[in-house]
Structure formats: structure tokens, C-alpha cells
């Protein structure tokens, strides 16, 4: 275990997604020392896994590239990837934090050349594409990854495949002897920006996500549409690789449901509206998207985007909570059963592909939160009882990218206030002494 680093004037930001990056940058650009820790090998979080943002339909590079450039150029930010918080103790202005750094098996000498990946043949499920394809066991997390450094999967460490990766590296970056490390931090305030995870669609039994190949989630569909995704951007059915021109989007898949998630996840409606445009772009007038909804929650500036989608002749809206999904065994088509509440008639409609707009859960399971952290009824982080720790982004509330950044700015300003008050208290104490 290494000696403590940082001071009571340091802000710790836990989570390197869009909220964590924003919180870290806001504090650093105000002159504060910041440590940004991320459990994955690269920054970016789920925002990096998007194909496009709504409502402008621009790519994540629009925001992430700018933030990454700011982080690289700011000496006040120290980035630690593959790092997880294991314990937090102390009080506002004086926290002791324990981190566990997992081995990357690639050191700072890495130039990102990719020779190690070319040398190995072993493959693993690709986490960036939600396991819908595979990648080499020596890999770069994604094209925009920061740090731009390869990762050796633990499954090939101690095997001939690992030795191939090591032998292929001309700069001695592959270090198969790396071990987990424990690091101690001393910080004055903590911003928890641990993000969110998609609700487990397999728990929604009537929809058959775990039984039917052609029922997928909205986050998986996002990767399908991306040229860097598992199909090269082609919208194809998982079961047989055929083009999915007739797509159903089911809203509130797990959200606003006492049996699953009580809250509205806020991003789902807009995500599905956006994804209908992916289908239209892929197939033109041959496209057919049907949105099954309870109500569409497009607020503020998103209302114009909703109206634009409503005017799209390839998109149809059915006001209904789908009761169940069956399977046409002959062609593999999912068959949706339910009642259209506008006119109250039953339907049994076939589609090539069904996309479940799954709800947003805060990523707090398995996170070593301190005992005095306050969670709301859905386990989103409200802050700490002592007023020194704050939730940010979708760790604090279901939020889209834009609002997550706004939330992170607010959390960062609160953390800065804690640092200022701590500094003032320490100065006063010294003067009295």
C-alpha cells in the first residue's frame, strides 16, 4: 500500500464519464487540484458509446473531444483509470480514501501502435459494444480512448497468447507481471459521478429479452447503428443477419413500474425518437418504425425534435403498454400483443426487430459508498450528511448528456466551496495557535 497522496485542498471525482469529466474540469480550471478516477480502462463512460446525441444528431466527438483536450492540457487534473474506491472515512474537508488499481498489463511506454493486438488470436466479448461482437484480448477500448493505451485482458496473462503480445511490443510496454495496487488519498471533498447502467431487460419477462434473439435494448441498438459497432453501422437482426427495416420501439421498458423501476428515466423517449431516425437514414422510405408508448416526455427544447419525428411518414405512434411479446417460429419475427388505447382495439403485430427503451439505474451496486451518503428511493445519490460529498450527473438523477453536465458543474461548485471553507478554517486555526 502506497503512502497517502493529495491534500485536504484536493477534490476527488469518482467516475470518468461526461459528468465526472465536467466536474473535474470545472474545478481544475478554477485552480483546484483534482484527482479523477475511473474504474474502466478509458474515460468517456456511456456517452462514448452513443452513436449520436439528440436533438442535433451530432456525434459524441462534439463534446468528448473538447473535454479530453481540456483534460490533457490541464496540469491540475490527475487521471487514474482502472481504479475503484474501496473505502472512504473521515469528515468534510478531511477524507481518507482507499483506491484499488487493477493491473492493465500495459505501462506508460505504450504508443498505441496495436502490434500486441495483431500478435494475439484470442478474443473476448467486446464491452464497448455490450458484448455483441468480440475483440482481440489485447485491445484499445475505443478509438477515442484516453489514455490512448492498450489493455491486456487477464484471461491471457500467463498463457502463450500473453507472451505473444509481450514479444510483439517493440517498446517494452507489455508488463505481464503487473499486480493490483492499493493507493491512499487525502482529499477535502468528493464528487460521486459513478453514472448509470441499463436496467436488466431479462427481468421484464413478458418481453422475452433473454429468449428471443430479435429483442434487444436501446443501448445495444445504439451500437448497431454506429459504423464502429458490431455490424459496421448496418441495422441487422441478431438472429439471421437480415436487414431490420420494420422496427418496434417499446417505451418505459422497466421504468415507471412498481415491479421494476419506480422512476421515469427521462432519456428513454428521446432515445427512441432519435433511433427512429437511424432506421429512416438506413432504409429511406422503405423504413418503418413504430413507437409503442404510454406518453412521450419530450421537455423544453426537445419538443421541436418530437414534432419533427411525428412528421416523419416512416414513423408511427401507438399509445399502448405492450402486454407481451411472442415469436413467429417460421420467420423469427417478434409479435407484439397489446391494446391500442386510442380506439381500444387489440393488436398482434409482427416486426423484424424490437428495441426495448430500458430504464436508467444509478451505478451504485458494488460501489464502496460511505455510510453517511444519502440515497433517494431509487438509490440515486443526494449527497452526504456532513455536506462534503455530492452526487453528479446520472448518479444523482436520471439525466441526458446536457443535463448531466449541468449537474456536474453544480456539484463541482459545491465541492469548491467545501475546499474554500476548509482552507479558511485551517488558516483561522493557525492564527489562533
Image (cartoon, rainbow, N blue to C red):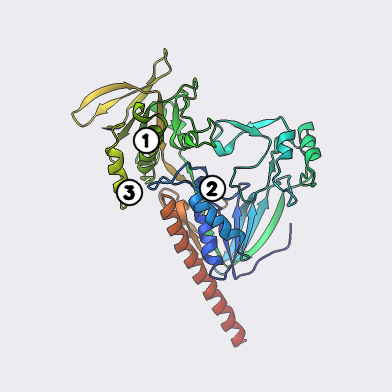
Side of 429 relative to 264 (left or right): right
Q: How crowded is mark 2: few (under 14 residues within 10 Å), some or many (20 or more)?
A: many
Can residue 261 be seen in the rendering of this structure?
A: yes
Vertical placement of residue 169 versus 287, above or below: below
Along the viewing direction, whichever of 235 and 184 lies nearer the viewer: 235
- Disc 1 designates what residue? 276
Quadrant housing residue 134: top right
Q: Is 300 left, or right, of 229 in this rendering?
A: left
Q: Which of marks 2 and 3 is in front?
A: 3
Q: Where is residue 426 in the image (x, y as percent from the top left)?
A: 59, 79
Q: Mark 2 points at which residue?
A: 45
Disc nearer the start of the sequence (3/1):
1
Extreme-left residue of the structure: 343
Which badge, 2 or 3, comes first in the chain's sequence?
2
- Secondary structure type for disc 1: helix
Q: Are marks 2 and 3 in contact (CB under 8 Å)?
A: no
Q: Which residue lies furthest to the top in this view?
A: 330
Q: Earlier in the sequence, mark 2 or mark 1?
A: 2
Q: How many marks?
A: 3
Q: How crowded is mark 3: few (under 14 residues within 10 Å), some or many (20 or more)?
A: some
Residue on which disc 3 sits: 302
- In what element is the residue under mark 2? helix
The mark closer to the camera, 2 or 1, is: 1
- Spatial CA distance of label 3 from label 1 is 15 Å
Q: Is residue 371 visible?
A: no
Measured as percent of width and height from the top left, residue 57 is found at 41, 45
Residue 191's spot in the image, x, y percent?
52, 60
Q: Which residue is drawn at 53% across and 30% down?
A: 231
Q: What element carries label 3?
A: helix
Residue 139 horizontal side relative to residue 307, left or right: right
Please identify the quadrant where the N terminus is shown: bottom right
Amino acid at each position: 500500500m502506497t503512502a497517502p497522496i493529495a491534500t485536504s485542498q484536493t477534490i476527488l471525482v469518482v467516475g470518468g464519464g461526461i459528468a465526472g469529466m465536467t466536474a473535474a474540469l470545472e474545478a481544475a480550471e478554477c485552480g483546484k487540484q483534482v484527482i479523477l478516477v475511473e474504474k474502466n480502462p478509458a474515460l468517456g463512460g456511456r456517452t462514448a458509446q452513443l452513436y449520436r446525441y439528440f436533438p442535433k444528431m451530432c456525434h459524441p466527438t462534439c463534446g468528448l473531444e473538447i473535454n479530453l483536450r481540456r483534460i490533457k492540457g490541464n496540469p491540475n487534473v490527475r487521471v487514474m483509470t482502472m481504479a475503484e474506491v474501496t473505502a472512504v472515512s473521515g469528515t468534510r474537508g478531511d477524507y481518507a480514501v482507499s483506491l484499488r488499481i487493477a493491473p492493465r498489463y500495459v505501462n506508460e511506454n505504450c504508443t498505441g501502435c496495436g502490434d500486441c493486438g495483431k500478435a494475439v488470436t484470442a478474443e473476448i466479448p467486446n464491452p464497448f459494444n455490450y458484448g455483441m461482437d468480440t475483440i482481440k484480448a489485447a485491445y484499445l477500448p475505443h478509438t477515442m480512448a484516453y489514455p490512448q493505451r492498450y489493455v491486456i485482458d487477464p484471461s491471457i496473462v500467463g498463457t502463450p497468447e500473453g507472451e505473444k503480445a509481450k514479444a510483439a511490443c517493440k517498446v517494452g510496454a507489455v508488463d505481464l507481471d503487473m499486480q493490483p495496487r492499493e493507493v491512499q488519498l487525502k482529499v477535502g471533498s468528493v464528487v460521486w459521478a459513478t453514472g448509470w447502467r441499463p436496467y436488466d431487460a431479462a427481468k421484464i419477462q413478458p418481453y422475452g429479452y433473454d429468449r428471443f434473439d430479435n429483442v434487444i435494448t436501446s443501448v445495444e441498438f445504439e451500437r448497431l447503428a454506429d459504423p464502429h459497432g458490431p455490424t459496421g453501422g448496418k441495422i441487422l437482426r441478431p438472429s439471421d443477419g437480415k436487414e431490420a427495416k420494420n422496427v418496434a420501439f417499446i417505451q418505459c421498458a422497466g421504468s415507471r413500474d412498481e415491479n421494476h423501476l419506480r422512476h421515469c428515466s427521462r432519456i428513454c423517449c428521446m432515445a427512441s425518437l432519435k433511433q427512429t431516425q437511424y432506421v429512416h437514414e438506413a432504409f429511406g422510405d422503405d423504413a418503418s418504425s413504430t413507437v409503442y408508448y404510454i406518453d412521450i416526455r419530450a421537455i423544453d427544447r426537445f419538443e421541436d425534435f418530437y414534432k419533427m419525428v411525428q412528421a416523419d411518414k416512416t414513423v408511427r405512434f401507438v399509445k399502448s403498454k405492450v402486454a407481451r411479446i411472442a415469436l413467429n417460429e417460421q420467420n423469427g419475427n417478434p409479435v407484439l400483443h397489446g391494446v391500442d388505447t386510442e380506439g381500444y382495439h387489440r393488436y398482434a403485430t409482427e416486426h423484424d426487430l424490437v428495441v426495448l427503451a430500458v430504464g436508467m439505474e444509478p451505478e451504485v451496486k458494488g460501489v464502496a459508498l460511505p455510510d453517511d451518503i444519502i440515497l433517494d428511493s431509487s438509490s440515486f445519490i443526494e449527497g452526504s450528511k456532513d455536506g462534503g460529498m455530492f452526487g453528479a450527473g446520472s448518479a444523482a438523477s436520471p439525466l441526458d448528456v446536457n443535463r448531466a453536465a449541468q449537474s456536474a458543474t453544480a456539484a463541482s461548485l459545491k465541492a469548491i466551496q467545501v475546499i474554500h471553507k476548509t482552507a479558511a478554517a485551517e488558516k483561522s486555526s493557525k492564527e489562533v495557535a
